[in-house]
Amino acid sequence: MGRPIIWRLSLMLMKPVEGRKIVPMYFPDNMNVQYFFFDTYPGYFLQALPIALVAGIIYAVYKRKKQGVSLQETILSSLFVCYITGLLSLTLFDLVMSDIYYFLFYHMPSGSSYHWFTFEYDFIPDFYFNFSSENAGNILMFLPFGALYPLFRRNSTWIHTIRMGIGVSVGIELLQPIFGRSFDINDIILNGFGVIVSTGVFFLLKTVFHQKS
């Protein structure tokens, strides 16, 4: 979702360093624990996971207070809350989240600066010319939506689920230039593809199991 590739950590030393430096994403040969946590996609996921779990637990406690709500329904609907919280953390608040972890680990500010209101927009769909790992990530990021949203809204149809998924993607993209990132039409297309695929699979399986039962 247009994340800048920046880091704050030395690849060789197990201590914080000053400033930021552009480095290759994913797993270099001399990767250490800090690099993995702060500068790889799995590391970003681990950063967002505790926040998502806390949001899900809070929602589950609230949900269980309602009469007639089963434990199974509570858990299934809470999964969507976990997912959407993690999604927003990764796409809008990733730099803030990383700085918080940096302070918790090193007891000092990261020294990073934020550039709000970039107002950068890319309306040219060109992902098919050079399909990158980031493009694949944009599809994978929205694959859970098509399965988790119908569990959150039990009466949701497949059309409504797709509309909501694409709507969330558009909303995130519109907000990203405010949070120092950029609007990219490619992200919306790929997010939408992920939603369509997962929604189709979910409702197909739902129909098959319903007929068997």
Image (spheres, rainbow, N blue to C red):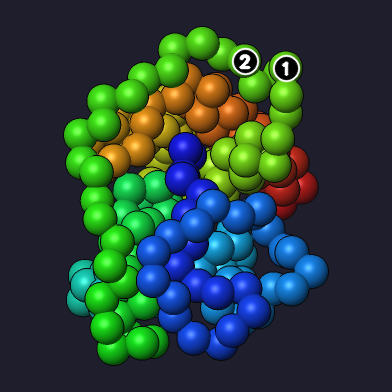
Say whether marks 1 and 2 touch (CB < 8 Å). Answer: yes
Q: Residues within 10 Å of mark 1 (few under 14, many from 20)?
A: few
Q: Is residue 35 left or right of residue 21?
A: right
State the residue at coordinates (43%, 60%).
Answer: 20
Instruction: Name the residue tied to disc 1.
Output: 129
Q: Residue at x 55, y 74 (%)?
A: 10
Q: Residue at x 26, y 31 (%)?
A: 118
Residue 187 x %, y % = 51, 29
Please provide percent x and percent y for residue 157: 47, 31
Toward the viewer: 172 or 126?
A: 126
Which secondary structure, mark 1? loop
- Judge left or right: residue 194 versus residue 145: right
Is 168 rendered above or below residue 144?
A: above
The mark found on residue 28 in the picture is none
Q: Which residue lies furthest to the front in this view?
A: 18
The residue singled out by tag 2 in the image is: 126
On the question of residue 83 being in view, the answer is no
| Res 101 quadrant in image | bottom left
* Type of amino acid under label 1: Phe
Residue 88 vs residue 92, the one in the foreground = 92
* Residue 46 percent across, percent down from the top left: 52, 72
Of residues 57 and 25, the one drawn nearer to the viewer in this rendering: 25
